[in-house]
Amino acid sequence: MVKPLDRRFAGHDVGELMLISTSKEINARIRRTRPGTAITIAQFRERLAKSANADFTCPLSTGIFLRIVAEAALEALAAGDSIDEVTPFWRVVEPDSALATKLSCGPKFISQQRVNGN
């Protein structure tokens, strides 16, 4: 959903268009990121906004949805899915990010997946 701001938010002005994405869209976008590719959360959010003809994405909801997608992937791995079957959230979540430290896998797992070219 793209919504014009009716007040300043996250450093953006009234009238700017903000994308409030969904966990489903975020999951799909991450899955389209090629193996061996790593982008920052900021770049990911910028691409999301551009694809929706918005000025920016909501940083709060995007962060929440990224965490949901990442934890779902980790749960699938724990249940026996292979690394190739789960959403490769490590392509978007930087190992040194605040989000990485909150995930049940921790930053080391993310770094290892990036080194492995997943």
Image: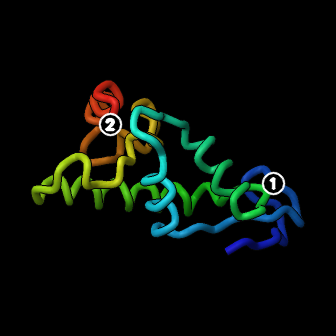
Comparing 27 with 41, the one in front is 27
Amino acid type, label 2 = Asn
On the picture, is 12 further left or further right than 90?
A: right
Circle 2: element type: loop
Residue at the far top: name it. Answer: 115
State the separation of the CA atoms marked 2 and 1: 35 Å
Kindly identify the residue that appears in the image at 61 percent across and 55 percent down.
59
Give the image location of residue 40, x and y in percent.
55, 37
Kindly identify the residue that appears in the image at 86 percent across and 57 percent down.
13
Kindly identify the residue that appears in the image at 77 percent across and 62 percent down.
53
Residue 68 occupies which quadrant of the picture?
A: bottom left
Circle 1: element type: loop
Q: Residues within 10 Å of mark 2 (few under 14, many from 20)?
A: some
Q: Is 91 situated above or below 51?
A: above
Comparing 118 with 9, the one in front is 118
In the picture, the disc for residue 118 is 2
Kindly identify the residue that appears in the image at 41 percent across and 32 percent down.
36
Q: Which residue, given by chain and number where applicable, does mark 1 sit on? A: 12
Image quadrant where one finds the N terminus = bottom right
